[in-house]
Image (cartoon, rainbow, N blue to C red):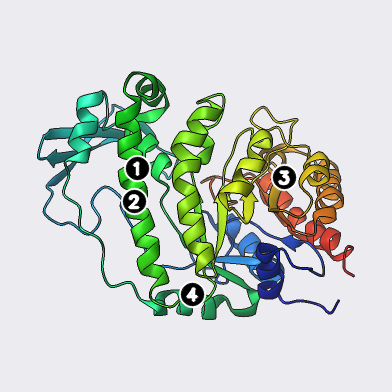
Amino acid sequence: MNKLTSHERLTRIFRGEEIDRPALKLWGASPDVGWQLHEAYGPVSALAAEMTDLFAGAGGYGLNPMFGSDGGTKVDHWKTETGDPLWLHCHTRIHTPKGDVEMVRRGSQIREPGYDMEHYVKDEEDIEKLLSIPYTSPEGMKKESYDEAAAHVGNRGIAMIDLPHAAYFVHQMMGSETLAYLSVDARELVDELISVYAKRIYDHVKRILETGVEHPIFGWCGPELFLPPLLSPRDFDDFVGKYDKPICDLIHEHGGYVWVHSHGQVRHFIERFIEMGVDVINPLEPEWMSNGDVDLDEVVGTFGGRIGLEGNIEIQEILQSSKERIAGLIDACVEAGWKSGRLILCPSAGYMEYPRPTEQYIENLLFYLRYGYEAVEKCRK
């Protein structure tokens, strides 16, 4: 096969068509080096823009399933001190027709990850409050938003429309512990909240598709929070599969494709993702990690090329391991994944998520890019 462009290669992986070699991705890389979380990331961003198969975000399609474009709901924001100058408590209060809900997030002043201290939903009454919030469907979806993103990335990759995920959004409203309790004590109410948000997302996708975008790719994150050990297989089917499949079907009916990010132990849910209509699943964390269970060789042997496989390189390995170990992991991943004909070699998380990267991490990122490129090139037909 002749050498494909990155755009052709990635498009064929989504379609399940023959490719010249596996794709190489560094999650978070873009055509433009642009802003850096830390100056040390500059060389990594530049090399990734040059060497990898890029996923570019298609802006202009954002959606908050809680409000839509409604501007009539009053929301208050304020901050309080924590006693530590590096952290603040960021408060948000929503005034709903049935009463206020409030959340508190511990926010970093030096770009560290934050932490939700208090969620909007503490009990069943708070779910009723969220359901009472007025919602207005966003208007003004424009085909140009996707076309401009696709033109900008060009042959270097693909553009992808990022969507909210109904079940994930509900999890964000209440957190894992409250969700676990309410999924038993108030299951119908939790299901109602997810169904309302899922319908809004479905209608949002429909409006995007009606603009006439050609073969769009949509992506979302979130099913991981409805897998064991947090929740059960039944919860996954009831709260994820039941609502995600109609959205996938709608996208496919209009010639589009679906990318889904789901951490966790997904091995026994891959068949469900395929049935749901997912074209590429990420990040397929390996079984030797505490949060993973994927033996890529076994997965390929079981499912073949029925779904695109992205990932299988754990980000902790790039953070902490030797170059020799990383090389061995890349070799094993490419050897196993290439048999499916639909592999995208990729770390399990975005590369620019650490505000103070170590020298080892930067060197390992550069090594991943260079060695990863050599490994996928060896597969070329």
Circle 1/circle 2 CB separation < 8 Å: yes
Evaluate if marks 3 and 4 touch, with contact meaning CB atoms under 8 Å apart. Answer: no
Disc number placed over residue 199 in the picture, else none:
2
Mark 4 belongs to which amino acid?
Ala
Q: Earlier in the sequence, mark 4 or mark 2?
A: 4
Q: Which residue is drawn at the image coordinates 62% and 56% (left, top)?
A: 279
Spatial distance from mark 1 to mark 2, Cα to Cα?
Answer: 6 Å
Which residue appears at 67% of the width and 67% of the height? Answer: 10
Disc 2 and disc 3: Cα gap in Å? Answer: 32 Å
Q: Would you identify the image quadrant in which residue 20 lies?
A: bottom right
Q: Earlier in the sequence, mark 3 or mark 1?
A: 1
Identify the mark at residue 195; answer none if there is no mark. Answer: 1
Mark found first going from the N terminus, 3 or 4: 4
- Residue that numbered label 3 is attached to: 312
Secondary element under disc 4, as helix, strand or loop, is helix
Q: Secondary structure at mark 2?
A: helix
Residues 364 and 289: in front is: 289
| SS at circle 1 | helix
Disc 2 marks a residue whose amino acid type is Lys
Element assignment for label 3: strand
Tally of numbered discs: 4
- Of circles 3 and 1, the one toward us is 1
Residue carrying label 4: 149
| Label 1 packing within 10 angstroms: few (<14), some (14-19), many (20+) | some
Can residue 92 be seen here? The reply is no
In the picture, the disc for residue 159 is none
Task: Name the mark nearer the viewer: 4 or 1.
Answer: 1
Give me the C-alpha separation between circle 4 and circle 2: 26 Å
Q: Residues within 10 Å of mark 4 (few under 14, many from 20)?
A: some
